[in-house]
Image (spheres, grey):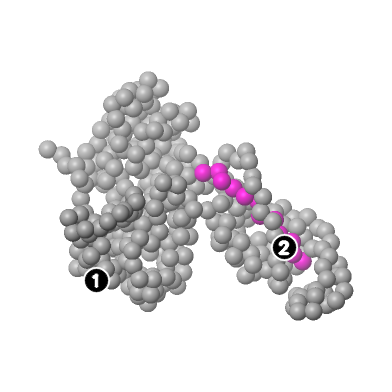
Amino acid sequence: MPTLEELLPIFSEFAPQSLAEPWDNVGLQLGDKRSKINRMLLSLNATQETIEEAIQKKCELLFTHHPLFFEDINSIVNTSALFDVIKDALAKNIGIYSAHTNLDKSEQGINKVLADYLELKKIEPLIADTDFKKLVFFVETKYSKKIIEELALLGAGKIGQYSNASFRSKGVGTFKPEAGAKPAVGEKGVVNEVGEERVEMLVHQSILVNVVKKLIETHPYEEVAYDIYPIEGIKKSNVGLGRIGDFSSQKRICDIIADLRQNVDGQISVLGNPEKKVRRAAILAGAGASYIEQTGAKGAELFITSDVKYHEAQKAAEIGLNLIILSHFAIEKFALNLLAPLLADKLNKSGYSVDVIISEKESDVWFEN
């Protein structure tokens, strides 16, 4: 049975914390890293209800989308709901981990599973996160392919729909191992010349730390020579907020709504003609109103999101963008249901058998009258 500390790097691979917005608070919120984890409850929020459910279902970890702590806290007293959540979690040794905007943006995160559910094709982030770096390292020619393959498994060298992308150029490396060195090649005390390759790979900032760690682990040299350069002008990425893509054939908006009604709880609001057929659509779980104009500019005919106010809907109507509005809770809860088996599979492939259970107790703060 893994410890919480052993699971943290896997959670960070699934939804890299460096993808989170600056104002967000993601990662381990509460808990003992030494705790053994056999079962985890997946929910949108850490509330009294979900903590009680975790206790009832014998879960040692509550994995939430929304962080337990959003703002600076000066005191926690028994007059606040937060007090009871923390008290009960600590009393039963239940950890709380949150993945919020990093899970929204991640390659296989909330918006990607929703786009897959809609069966969109040529899927890409609606608002791409293009914070890329160029990783350059030097190694003997016979080792370069193996290292490239190892780094590619972590996502290095991924450009759009292409993976394992790299550039290799030959040269000569020189070095003089001093008395205490243990060189993989060459002799101590003399200047050695070794035929090497310079290898260049594009790496997104969100995985850079793990990629460099793997480079150092895999590289045969005692001292690994590598450089990291900032990159500008990249417009495409596999991570970012929302997703946009095309249906294989035109779909009526009313048919999309009918499908959502069968699978997503809560009220659905519509802007536009339900009989209209659309080909290009975008989806952004949670508050997506501020991206209406960008969505229209990317050629979307339909935008599925939440938390749209009157004047924002007016702007969508002005630019001819049809809207399907779901409740914030409903769209993200549905996405978590789709994500649960992917997270369980990620843990299993990492060698840990942990039951991932979807919360059945939490409910929307809004209800239909």
Q: Estimate the x, y position of residue 66 in percent, counting from the top left.
A: 33, 52
Residue drawn at x 72%, y 57% as measured from the top left = 199
Majority secondary structure of the magenta segment?
A: strand
Numbered tag placed on residue 225 in the rendering: 2
Q: Identify the amino acid type marked 1.
A: Lys
For residue 279, above or below residue 142: above
Label disc, if present, on residue 305 of the rendered structure: none
- Check residue 248 for magenta coloring: no
Is 326 placed left or right of 206 in the picture? left
- Residue 132 inside the magenta-drawn segment: yes
Q: For residue 177, what is the image quadrant?
A: bottom right
Looking at the rendering, in which quadrant would you find the C terminus?
top left
The mark that comes first in sequence, 2 or 1, is: 1
What is the secondary structure assignment of the residue under circle 1? loop
Residue at point 38%, 62% (across, down): 28
Q: Position of residue 297 (x, y in %)?
A: 47, 28
Q: Secondary structure beneath disc 2?
A: loop
Residue pictured at 20% horizontal, 50% vertical: 363
Residue 302 in picture, x, y percent from top left: 38, 32
Q: Is residue 255 left or right of residue 203?
A: left
Q: Using the image as rendered, state which of residue 2 and residue 69 is in the foreground.
A: 69
Separation (CA) of disc 2 from disc 1:
48 Å
The vertical placement of 46 against 91, above or below, is: above
Which residue, given by chain and number where applicable, does mark 1 sit on?
Answer: 92
User: What type is the residue that disc 2 sits on?
Assistant: Ala
Which range of residues does the magenta coloring cover? 129-140
Q: Is residue 340 left or right of residue 265?
A: right
